[in-house]
Image (spheres, grey):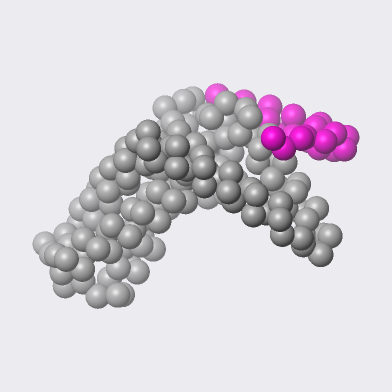
Amino acid sequence: MGTQITKETFEFLYNNTYKSILKYTICHCRNLDDVNDIIQDTYTELYQAIVNKKYINLENSESYIIGIAKNKIKSHYSSSKVIYHIKSENENLDQYRDNEIDIEQDIITKDNVLQVWNYLKSKNELTAKIFYLYYVIDIPIKEIAEELELTESNVKNHLYRTQKELKDKFKKGDDYNVR
């Protein structure tokens, strides 16, 4: 059953599907740094499809949006996009190096977060995904296990072992050099 699309309908779809689309994207991306771009592209394409069609089947909207996300993930990892992404990331890093920030506390906090995030990314991709799902979007361990086709015990082992490593590494004041 289709319905006339309004701004409120799009917001309704976005609010009711965002968490599941984010979870799907995290579980199927090769690089967690790409998740936000893919989510943005997914909802942009959804909006364009809605504007062009002027209706959407609300009963199957989540499946439809997951299909868009799946296509965005595939197209995002085409070879030309990967090369462009690497170049643009390097340009972004140069931009940050050139800008000076006077607020020392912000630098320390951002630096610490960056160090922890880079440390997590240096671990295997599965561990980084588990951390992101658990700590950023608050997915329960049981649901993470189901989505990643792991046992709950395996998910807990990844979480707790890495938590301990993070505490040991950053509690002692060890510097984790960002590359």
Q: Position of residue 171 (x, y in %)?
A: 85, 38
Position above or below: 53 against 8: above
Quarter holding residue 154: top right
Range drawn in magenta: 154-179
- Farthest residue toward the left? 1
Q: Nearer the viewer, residue 2 or 45?
A: 45
Quarter holding residue 155: top right
> Which quarter of the image is occupied by the N terminus?
bottom left
Judge left or right: residue 46 versus residue 83: left
Q: Position of residue 132 (x, y in %)?
A: 56, 42
Q: Position of residue 169 (x, y in %)?
A: 80, 32
Residue 134 in sight: no
Judge left or right: residue 136 versus residue 14: right
Judge left or right: residue 115 versus residue 4: right
Q: Nearer the viewer, residue 179 or 116?
A: 179
Q: Residue at x 52, y 47 (%)?
A: 88
Q: Nearer the viewer, residue 52 or 63?
A: 52
Residue 161 in sight: yes
How many numbered marks, from 0 up?
Answer: 0
Tell whether position 168 is magenta.
Answer: yes
Q: Main secondary structure of the magenta part?
A: helix
Q: Residue at x 65, y 41 (%)?
A: 117
Q: Residue at x 36, y 54 (%)?
A: 41
Tell whether position 57 is magenta.
Answer: no
> Which quarter of the image is occupied by the C terminus?
top right
Position above or below: 85 against 124: below
Judge left or right: residue 112 versus residue 117: right
Q: Residue at x 33, y 53 (%)?
A: 42
